[in-house]
């Protein structure tokens, strides 16, 4: 396999993964919107005051009482939406940090980080992919001035 074919194959694989990340992000947005809509209560006839539910943490559990989701404000001010598998292990997280950075982390069945999509206050955006040892294997970055960069790394972390 030539170097060009190998690079073409890697780019195709990253494009497939990027489509998967977009679908996962869409699913997270749908879940958040659904949670918000489920929290809306209709006013009794003749009521004039608004009903507001406030909390530092919301927990989502399945019918057996197992943790499946959590939405909370952390002590440092970070907002976290976490989704869990049937085994109660974290599989995805959406974070908004106090500095305004936003990130979506995707985790494997062993709760190891496999992908991160981040947007920073500077306007930089990145998609970072990790192997099962949580070593960076690929980074795609887009800068606010319009330039972008793409790096692939081998199993030893060499570009």
Image (spheres, rainbow, N blue to C red):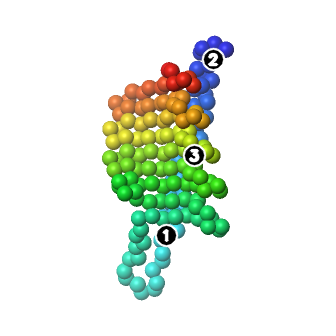
Compared to 127, does 41 lie above or below? below
Q: Nearer the viewer, mark 2 or mark 3?
A: 3
Which residue is denoted by mark 1 in the rendering? 39
Task: Name the spot of residue 134 as percent of width and height, x first.
Answer: 54, 35
Report how far apart the C-alphas of labels 2 and 3 lie in the structure. Answer: 33 Å
Report how far apart the C-alphas of labels 1 and 3 lie in the structure. Answer: 29 Å
Q: Earlier in the sequence, mark 2 or mark 3?
A: 2
Work out whether residue 31 or residue 77 is closer to the camera in this orientation and state it. 77
Which residue is denoted by mark 3 in the rendering? 111
Q: Nearer the viewer, mark 1 or mark 3?
A: 3
For residue 83, say whether it is visible: yes
Which residue is denoted by mark 2 in the rendering? 5
Work out whether residue 105 or residue 146 is closer to the camera in this orientation and state it. 105
Quarter containing the N terminus: top right
Pointer 3: residues within 10 angstroms few (<14), some, or many (20+)?
some
**Going by the image, does 31 lie left or right of 46?**
right
């Amino acid at each position: 396999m030539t170097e060009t074919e190998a690079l073409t194959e890697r780019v195709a694989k990253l494009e497939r993964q990027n489509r998967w990340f977009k679908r996962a992000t869409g699913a997270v947005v749908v879940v958040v919107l659904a949670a918000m809509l489920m929290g809306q209560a209709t006013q009794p006839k003749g009521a004039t005051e608004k009903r507001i539910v406030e909390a530092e943490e919301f927990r989502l559990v399945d019918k057996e009482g197992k943790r499946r989701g959590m939405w909370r404000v952390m002590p440092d001010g970070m907002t976290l939406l976490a989704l869990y598998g049937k085994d109660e292990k974290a599989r995805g997280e959406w974070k908004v940090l106090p500095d305004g950075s936003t990130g979506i982390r995707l985790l494997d069945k062993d709760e190891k980080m496999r992908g991160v999509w981040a947007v920073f206050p500077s306007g930089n955006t990145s998609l970072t992919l990790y192997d099962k040892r949580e070593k960076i294997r690929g980074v795609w970055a887009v800068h606010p001035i319009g330039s972008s960069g793409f790096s692939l790394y081998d199993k030893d972390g060499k570009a």
